[in-house]
Image (cartoon, helix red, strand yellow):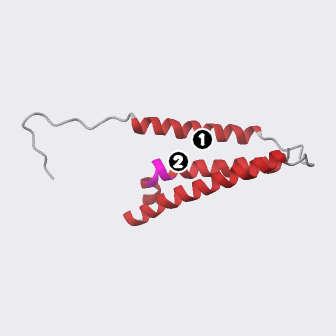
Amino acid sequence: MRKRTVKTGLNLILAGVVSLILATFYHAHVARLLFLSPGGETILVLLGFLLGGAAGCIGILVALIGMVLGSGKDQDVRLSYTVILLASALVIYFFLSYLSITGTEPPGLEPGETITI
């Protein structure tokens, strides 16, 4: 196993997960930070999903190639920090997904109350 190649693949997967988190949950904040219009925000979300998926797929392929290849001279490379960061990013993604599903609903209308648009 070539640890440096595996670490590169895991870093790509981590970049893909972070891109998905930003595009899914924080797109409005990033668009406001970059002074984007609503159309630009839509493009930001689409690019976030596209780049996140591409980085994740390429990262998986690179990590698998690194695992299949014979060992190299890179024995001093540590994978533990990268694995911890990747695991924490995945936990954060699933936690934010859970919060978005079970979020508070707006209060309903009282009987006889009208909606002002």
At which x and y percent is residue 31? 44, 59
**Residue visible at 43% across and 65% down in the picture:** 40
At which x and y percent is residue 19? 56, 52
At which x and y percent is residue 36? 42, 65
In the visual, does 33 lie left or right of 87? left
Judge whether residue 19 can be spotted in this image: yes
Query: Which mark sits nearer the N-terminus, 1 or 2?
Result: 2
Q: In the rendered structure, which segment of residues is drawn in magenta?
A: 23-27
Q: Looking at the picture, which amino acid does disc 2 mark?
A: Ile
**Residue visible at 52% across and 47% down in the picture:** 21
In the visual, does 89 lie left or right of 68? left
Q: Which element carries disc 2, helix, strand or loop?
A: helix
Tell me how far mark 1 sits from mark 2, CA to CA: 9 Å
The residue where tag 2 is placed is: 21
At which x and y percent is residue 25? 46, 47
In the visual, does 88 lie left or right of 100? right
In the visual, does 5 lie left or right of 59? right
Near-viewer residue (61 or 83): 61
Magenta stretch, main secondary structure, is helix
Near-viewer residue (53 or 79): 53
**Within the magenta stretch, is there residue 69?**
no
The furthest residue to the front: 68
Q: Quadrant of residue 41?
A: bottom left
72 to 41, vertically: above or below: above
**Residue visible at 47% across and 56% down in the picture:** 30
**Residue 64 got which mark?**
none
The residue where tag 1 is placed is: 89
Q: Looking at the picture, which amino acid does disc 1 mark?
A: Ala
